[in-house]
Image (tube, rainbow, N blue to C red):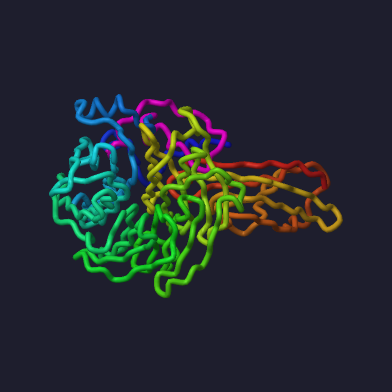
Amino acid sequence: MKILKNENASLNIFGKYFFASIFILSFVVILYAKQKSTTYFFPPFKHTWGIRKGTEENLDMLLGNKTDFDDPQGITVIKLKQWDDPNSKKDDDEVTVYGVNSGRCQIIYNKSMYGLAIYGSCGRGKGQFRTPKGITATENGDVYVADYGNGRIVHLRMPKDKLIWVKSFGEKYLKAPFDIASIPGDTLYITDFKKNSVLVFDSSGTLIREFTGFYGPKGIDVDAHTIKWSAYKGDYFVVIDSFGKRILKINRTNGRIDKIVRTNSIGLSGSKLQYLALDYLGNVHVTDFNRCQLHKFDKDLKYITSFGSCGYKDEQLDQPRGITIWKRFGQIFVSERISAQYFWIGLEVKKFRFTHNNNDNSVTVSFFITETAYVKARIIGKGVDLSLWKRKKRIDLGGYKEKIILPVGLDSGNYKIIFEFEPTYSSRNYLEKTFTKKIKI
């Protein structure tokens, strides 16, 4: 792995606001170190000042000992319209993150790029929650919370820098709402853990539809043709059910199950899946409480890879719960038992194989990549430095194999074939995987 020195990034992520981005923002300083696994990539020092993991100690520094991490749950990220200058790109990375601190019946969020705030207390009334779980937000400043213990959805709004109560709804239909996802138009998709359903509401609280037949559904996310930062704009939702033992992809128009994945069938025995999030390309990222991992699936729920182990060191997770992704730039936020972490979508290249056939002047290459990547291939030697493709290729994640005919007229001698892989998203200018093979012609 090579860390690129090119500083021409399109955004300065977290460098100027990371200290204030939800309860995640109380972060302990960890100097950037070379990673062994880069499926989820540590943002470079320039963008975080070496700060990417949150702790209770730093939370106290920002909020004056007003709260502690107490059963963190859902988390959501959004770019608010009221914080956006449409005539400037300098603020495109300035997002708002809302996190559920369930044990304290609170929402913790960044009220500006430099300050945190808390909303809520325990109870059944206005401004109160009981064991809240999932959360979602819209660019217009509407925030919806799955108030699990009170069997309702709480609608909040952030007109400027402070959350305010709007109303609650769904009490007539909901028993134990666990997670919530939204699409433009404020259509809400809600898992009900005890009712074994996914219910669809509009923002007024009117029930639009109910999908049944689940078993202990938990995390949910939804795609739609109206979502700006969605490459495929599919009309489906993805949900965890069976008490965290399987994932389903469901057509939200006709209710058809398009795909089911059981954790035992893909070697993830003992899993307890919690929440999930879709990225820009439709890939599914899932938190696993028991195995202390993040699992990645493609848009068709094909298992790609897992990241992490139990612990507190780099590349480890501590009972991960909520997960959210700012799709435009591939920023990932994960809540844990008493902390939270921040990653970029990165890239791993696995099972790289290379063979050279002098008989037909060709090479054959195969590999497995954990993220869509840009790939370059060239041959160097004997005064030659040539690209083996007309242009840099963009290749989808998964397995790949290709035979490449080498340029004609090469002199006899020793050459090097070099393959370079770069991820998309923000990590593109900072992470590169290079494989070099020697051949003799």
Q: Is 141 colored magenta in this rendering? A: no
Horizontal and vertical percent position of residue 310: 50, 32
As drawn, 117 above or below 378: above
As drawn, 49 above or below 347: above
Horizontal and vertical percent position of residue 197: 37, 62
**Residue sticking out furthest to the bottom:** 254
Q: Is 38 colored magenta in this rendering? A: yes
Observer-nearest residue: 374 or 337?
337
- What residue is shown at x 34% (from left), y 29% (from top)? 55
- What residue is shown at x 70% (from left), y 52% (from top)? 366
Q: Is residue 93 visible?
A: yes
Q: Is residue 356 left or right of residue 14?
A: right
- What residue is shown at x 39% (from left), y 56% (from top)? 220
- What residue is shown at x 36% (from left), y 63% (from top)? 198
Observer-nearest residue: 78 or 12?
78
**Residue sticking out furthest to the right:** 359
Horizontal and vertical percent position of residue 148: 29, 50
Magenta region, main secondary structure:
loop
Q: Is residue 4 left or right of residue 144?
A: right
Observer-nearest residue: 56 or 11?
56
Of the 4 image quadrants, the one containing the N terminus is top right
Horizontal and vertical percent position of residue 9: 40, 44
Q: Is residue 163 left or right of residue 359?
A: left
Q: Which range is magenta?
A: 21-50
Which corner quadrant of the image does residue 101 belong to?
A: top left
Q: Is residue 248 left or right of residue 211?
A: right
